[in-house]
Amino acid sequence: MKNLFVIFLILLLGCGVEEATPTKPANDNFMTDAATKISMGSIMGINHTVSGTATVYKSDGEYTLVLDPFQSQNGPDLKVYLSKDIGAKSFIRLGVLKSTTGKQAYAIPSSITLAEYPYAHIWCEAFSVEFARAMLN
């Protein structure tokens, strides 16, 4: 019985609940007026409540994905991806979702060919669940 209690205690402490995404509105200072719009798409929730616009901009030779406006249902371990396919089987992780609301910008690695990544996703990595997607046209 003592061994079961010890195992239970280890599992309880080692398998903590994932933290939810911050809800305080993000307000990245990416200057869209000084950048060139490359592509954009409407963000659609996939079995979750998510809305907004995903836009790729080029500024000073660098590409940036901007979510603005943006609002999402909360969830654990949410990440921002660009992918080659609708199911995000081949993707680039741009970073952790900064907030469930507000303008947020994510640098796109210069090593990728942007035309090969026509989808932006909000993805819950902890449970391998897609929260939202935008097709960038």
Image: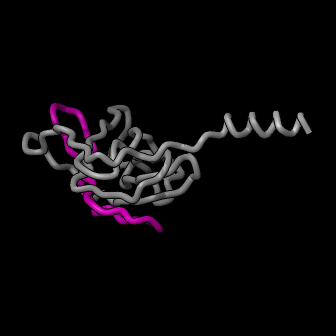
> Which quadrant, please, contains the N terminus?
top right
**Residue ranking furthest to the bottom:** 47
What secondary structure is the magenta-colored segment mainly? strand
Position of residue 13 relative to residue 84, above or below, is: above
The range drawn in magenta is 39-65
| Left or right position of 112 against 8 | left
Residue 60 in the magenta stretch? The answer is yes
Residue drawn at x 16%, y 49% as measured from the top left: 37
**Residue ranking furthest to the front:** 2
Residue 69 in the magenta stretch? The answer is no
> Which quadrant, please, contains the C terminus?
bottom left
Residue drawn at x 45%, y 59% as measured from the top left: 131
Residue drawn at x 44%, y 40% as measured from the top left: 93
Residue 6 in the image, given as x and y percentages of width and height: 82, 33
Position of residue 136 relative to residue 22, above or below, is: below
Residue 47 in the image, given as x and y percentages of width and height: 47, 68
Colouring: one colour
Residue 3 in the image, given as x and y percentages of width and height: 89, 34
**Residue ranking furthest to the left:** 33
Residue situated in front as seen by the camera: 13 or 39: 13
Residue drawn at x 20%, y 49% as measured from the top left: 38
Position of residue 5 relative to residue 88, above or below, is: above
Q: Quadrant of residue 45?
A: bottom left
